C-alpha cells in the first residue's frame, strides 16, 4: 500500500470514529464519513467495499491505536489461571473508558443498523475469546470453581464484563472508572 493510500485510509478510519461518536452511531452514512474525511463517497468505497467493512475496520483501528495487543500481553503471559483472569479483567476495565464513546455509539445503533451490529459483534466476540482463554487457564490449573464448566463460566464472565454493566456501575452507581 502506498503512503498516500495509507494516509487516506487512516483519515477515513479516524473520521469514521469521530463521526460515529458525534452522531451517537445513528444514521451515519458513507457520505457523512466522506465529508468528514474531506474526500468523495466513491473514494471511501475504493478503500472499504461496504459500510460494514468500514465500521469493523474503524473499531479495530481504534484498538490498534490504543495498543490493545501490548496491553493484553501481561494477561496472555500469566502463569496461573487466577492471574490470567485478574489481569484480563484489569485490562478490560481500564480499556472500556477509552473506547466508551465508540462502543456506546455502536451499541445504540445496532438494533437498527446491521453494519454497526456487525462491527460491535466482531469486537464482543474477540472479548469473549479473551474470557474463554482466562476460563481455560483456570480449568487447566484446576481452579475453576466446582459446579462450573468452561462454556458456562465463559458465558458468565463475558456477560459480567459487558459495557452496559460497566455503564451501570460507573454512571448509575457512581463507581470510579
Image (tube, rainbow, N blue to C red):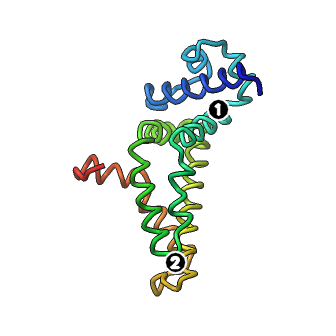
- Whole-Å distance between the Cαs marked 1 and 2? 36 Å
Q: Which mark is residue 138?
A: 2
In the rendered image, which residue does mark 1 sit on? 54
Q: Residue at x 55, y 61 (%)?
A: 130
The reply, left or right, for residue 114 in relation to residue 157 is right
Q: Which mark is residue 177?
A: none
Task: Indicate the position of residue 124 as horizontal and vertical percent values.
Answer: 55, 52
Task: Indicate the position of residue 28 as horizontal and vertical percent values.
Answer: 54, 25
Residue 97 occupies quadrant? top left
Q: Residue furthest left?
A: 174
The reply, left or right, for residue 45 in relation to residue 172 is right
Q: Residue furthest right?
A: 1
Instruction: Rate crowding at label 1 as few (under 14), some (14 to 19) or many (20 or more) other CA atoms within 10 Å.
Output: many
Q: Residue at x 59, y 28 (%)?
A: 13
Task: Indicate the position of residue 163 as horizontal and vertical percent values.
Answer: 42, 51
The reply, left or right, for residue 173 in relation to residue 91 is left
Looking at the rendered structure, the secondary structure element under dot 2 is: helix
> Image quadrant for the N terminus?
top right
Above-or-below relation of 56 to 76 = above
Above-or-below relation of 37 to 83 = above
Task: Indicate the position of residue 79 as horizontal and vertical percent values.
Answer: 53, 74
Instruction: Rate crowding at label 2 as few (under 14), some (14 to 19) or many (20 or more) other CA atoms within 10 Å.
Output: many
Looking at the rendered structure, the secondary structure element under dot 1 is: helix
Q: Which sits in the foreground, 14 or 33?
A: 14
Upstream in sequence: badge 1 or badge 2: 1
So how many labels did they put on this image? 2
Q: Which sits in the foreground, 70 or 68?
A: 70
Q: Residue at x 44, y 56 (%)?
A: 91
Callout in the foreground (1, 2): 2
Q: Which sits in the foreground, 69 or 16?
A: 69
Amino acid at each position: 500500500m502506498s503512503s498516500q493510500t495509507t494516509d487516506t485510509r487512516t483519515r477515513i478510519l479516524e473520521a469514521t470514529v469521530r463521526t460515529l461518536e458525534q452522531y451517537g452511531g445513528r444514521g451515519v452514512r458513507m457520505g457523512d464519513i466522506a465529508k468528514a474525511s474531506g474526500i468523495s463517497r466513491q473514494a471511501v468505497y475504493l478503500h472499504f467495499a461496504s459500510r460494514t467493512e468500514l465500521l469493523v475496520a474503524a473499531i479495530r483501528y481504534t484498538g490498534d491505536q490504543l495498543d490493545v495487543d501490548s496491553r493484553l500481553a501481561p494477561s496472555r503471559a500469566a502463569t496461573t489461571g487466577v492471574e490470567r483472569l485478574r489481569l484480563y479483567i484489569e485490562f478490560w476495565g481500564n480499556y472500556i473508558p477509552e473506547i466508551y464513546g465508540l462502543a456506546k455509539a455502536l451499541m445504540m445503533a445496532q438494533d437498527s443498523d446491521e453494519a454497526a451490529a456487525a462491527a460491535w459483534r466482531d469486537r464482543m466476540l474477540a472479548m469473549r475469546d479473551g474470557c474463554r482463554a482466562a476460563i481455560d487457564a483456570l480449568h487447566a490449573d484446576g481452579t475453576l470453581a466446582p459446579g462450573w464448566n468452561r462454556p458456562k463460566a465463559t458465558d458468565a464472565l463475558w456477560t459480567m464484563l459487558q459495557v452496559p454493566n460497566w455503564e451501570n456501575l460507573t454512571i448509575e452507581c457512581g463507581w470510579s472508572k
